[in-house]
Image: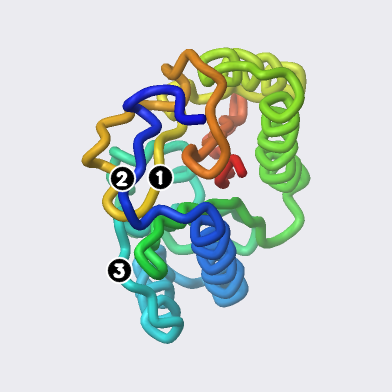
Amino acid sequence: MVNSAQEAVGEKFVLESMRRARDKTWEVVERVASKVKPGMLESEALAECKSVLQDMKMDRIWHPILIRFGENTLRTFKERSQDDPRLKDDDIFFIDLGVVWQGHEGDSGATFVVGADAEMHACAQDAKTVFDEVEHHWRTTGAGGKALYDYAAERAHALGWKLNLDIKGHRVSDFPHAIYKAGNLGDFQPHPNAGLWILEIQLAHPTRPFGAFYEDLLV
């Protein structure tokens, strides 16, 4: 049951179509990640992603493609990348895609590591771990959106990372979800319903200049 106007959907909304959009977006993330290599510029990775999206015949993108290398992994969605860094032999990067497939919004993001930096590998893995723990909390406790992010902050701290609480998740739906003005998941008091909300986790290393990002649909 829809909690409020913040969980409104359009006439074309189908939950199974949200799942398909999610799966297609993850396919792009994985395909692009496999093409990102040391020596590549951030802008070159972005161009590669656009090519993959065209090949897969997306409807359109609904938010700008974000691919962040190195220190830029600490930047939020609204912040521009600093310069156009080249991926190092031991480095970290994330991909964040918002793509429309058959009129429904996919939004997926994950962090990847090249080389053998143990802390970078741990950060990338723990972004997914915190996501999984919070998703389980959502499934099993009936927690509201604000409580989910309180829990995420606790789990990130326990693993030795800082959670960026300026990143609080958001609505998705049949395109365009923005007409519903739903606000952030982290400010949503009720228990969020399945297929409508993106849970975002962005971690920062406590002392070194890099972080990690993971997001997916709560479904």
Residue at the image point whose x is 39% and y is 48% from the top:
173
**Which percent across, then down, holds residue 166?**
41, 24
Tag 2 near tag 1, CB within 8 Å: yes
Residue at the image point whose x is 30% and y is 39% from the top:
79
Location of mark 1 (residue): 172
Location of mark 2 (residue): 177
Which secondary structure lies at badge 3? Answer: strand
**Which percent across, then down, holds residue 28?**
52, 70
Q: Around disc 3, counting alpha carbons within 10 Å, would you say few (fewer than 14), some (14 to 19), or many (20 or more)?
A: some
Q: Mark 3 or 1 closer to N-term?
A: 3
- Residue 60's tag is 3
> Which of the two discs, 3 and 2, sits closer to the camera?
2
Between the C-alphas of marks 2 and 1, the distance is 5 Å
- Residue 140's tag is none
The amino acid type of the residue labelled 1 equals Val
Between the C-alphas of marks 3 and 1, the distance is 15 Å
